[in-house]
Image (cartoon, rainbow, N blue to C red):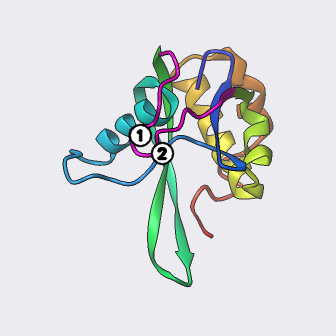
Amino acid sequence: MNEAGRVLLIRMADRWNLPGGTPEVYDDGWEATLRREVLEEADMTLREVVPLGYQEVRSEDARPFAQLRVAGRVDEWREPSPDPDSGLVYPRVWVPLGQAADLLGWGEPGHAQAAAAARVALDIYGFAGAAAIAQGASAVSTRVMQVV
């Protein structure tokens, strides 16, 4: 998230997504996984990472797993480079936090995640650009945690 209350989305295949991924054996915890994936996919580093909640993902052909949702403040923005796993350079776009859930297709739980991120942006990071989202939506009224 940046000072203007915008969140970075990346274009992967035919859809927008947040940078992220799965742990590698050498990652020292979830935050190390997050930092590595954000650097690999979005070419940026983070500071002041704050957990927001999680969602449990279930599919017919895989074991259930949890996706952690966090807010992170951008530290360093780098030139685009190929993801070491795919070899692709993902297009990046900054979108207003209030529009991210719609672009991601996440519905009400996504809006709750955006409201929770806006609250962190306002209260912890001091980003005035997130004030309208933090005040206009309640992260408490809709669960950030969900099963998809």
Query: Quadrant location of residue 132?
Result: top right
Q: Nearer the viewer, residue 59 or 86?
A: 86
Percent from the top left, x then y, of residue 35?
Answer: 37, 34
Q: Residue at x 72, y 50 (%)?
A: 14
Residue topped by disc 2: 20
Percent from the top left, x then y, of residue 97?
Answer: 71, 33
Is residue 81 one of those drawn in magenta? yes
Q: Of callouts 1 and 2, which one flags the residue occurring earlier in the amino acid sequence?
A: 2
Which span of residues is magenta-colored? Answer: 78-93
Secondary-structure class at tag 2: loop
Q: Nearer the viewer, residue 67 or 132?
A: 67
Q: Main secondary structure of the magenta part?
A: loop
Task: Give left or right: position of 138 versus 35.
Answer: right
Secondary-structure class at tag 1: helix
Residue topped by disc 1: 37
Is residue 89 positioned above or below 26 on the image? Answer: above
Task: Give left or right: position of 115 versus 63.
Answer: right
